[in-house]
Image (cartoon, rainbow, N blue to C red):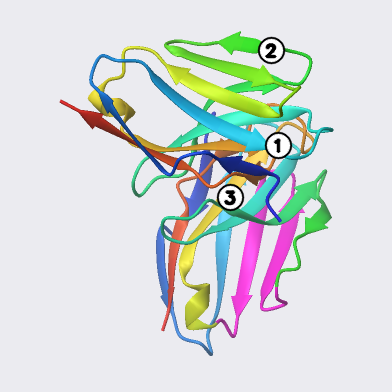
Amino acid sequence: DTEVTQTPKHLVMGMTNKKSLKCEQHMGHRAMYWYKQKAKKPPELMFVYSYEKLSINESVPSRFSPECPNSSLLNLHLHALQPEDSALYLCASSQGTLQDYGYTFGSGTRLTVV
Amino acid sequence: GESVGLHLPTLSVQEGDNSIINCAYSNSASDYFIWYKQESGKGPQFIIDIRSNMDKRQGQRVTVLLNKTVKHLSLQIAATQPGDSAVYFCAEAALFGKGTRLHILP
């Protein structure tokens, strides 16, 4: 299996809702990433987990809460989001660290906050 | 802030010609660079990578050149095809540059 699987593919949520985005990989990769991508912009790094520990938080607001339950799974918990948080949320993985090979991206979750 | 950037936002190339997409980076300690292709509605797709101990790396129809002296890398696509139409990003490990949209002219 050489894929990163993200669910759901589309999500519409209200500003008072709580939802979670899920990401899964079975390549044995030990680094996993969350990115946010707005239209016509590059992906912006949000969080990095390395060996199931949060190693980088790029000053992301606390309404986004990442979780890495095990080496294959990565979640992003969402609460009290704003309309400007609407974007494509991408998950990626690589072998072990930021400088390691094998960066593989999922197809993303298209999030709309209403 | 971003450590990598692209020289041109849009590049139009005749089908069958070679394409060259450029990228500059600012961190001289950068060790690992990746080129991605992103089609509409999809996640970035890995094309080719290169480490700082190399100057050139070739794949199928693609070549990446790294010039550490001027902190510049480029992606060359040979015999550009309609399926090459996409946005191309360079990245320094996990950090993305701005992107270049490649248009293929018939």
Q: Where is residue B23 in the image (x, y as percent from the top left)?
A: 58, 33
Q: Which of marks 2 and 3 is in front?
A: 2
- A72 magenta-colored: yes
Looking at this view, name the residue that lies furthest to the left: B106
Magenta-highlighted residues: A61-81
Instruction: Tell me if residue A26 can be seen.
Output: no
Looking at this view, name the residue that lies furthest to the bottom: A16
Which subunit holds the residue at mark 2?
A: B
- Total of numbered circles in the picture? 3
Are circles 3 and 1 on residues that touch, CB within 8 Å?
A: no
Reply above or below: B62 against A75. above
Residue to which mark 1 is pinned: B93
- The residue depicted at 52 percent of the width and 35 percent of the height is A3
* Disc 2, SS: loop
Which subunit holds the residue at mark 3?
A: A
Instruction: Tell me if residue A98 can be seen.
Output: yes
Q: Position of residue B58 (x, y in %)?
A: 55, 9
Which amino acid does the dot numbered 3 rest on?
Cys
Chief secondary structure of the magenta portion:
strand
Residue to which mark 3 is pinned: A91
- The residue depicted at 52 percent of the width and 39 percent of the height is B7
Left/right placement of residue A42 relative to residue B16 reads right
Circle on res. B55: 2
Left/right placement of residue B49 relative to residue B103 reads right
Q: Where is residue A1 in the image (x, y as percent from the top left)?
A: 54, 29
Which subunit holds the residue at mark 1?
A: B
Q: Where is residue B106 in the image (x, y as percent from the top left)?
A: 15, 25
* Disc 1, SS: loop
Left/right placement of residue B13 relative to residue B52 reads left
| Quarter where residue A63 is shown | bottom right
**Disc 1 crowd, CA 10 A, few/some/many (<14, 14-19, 20+):** many
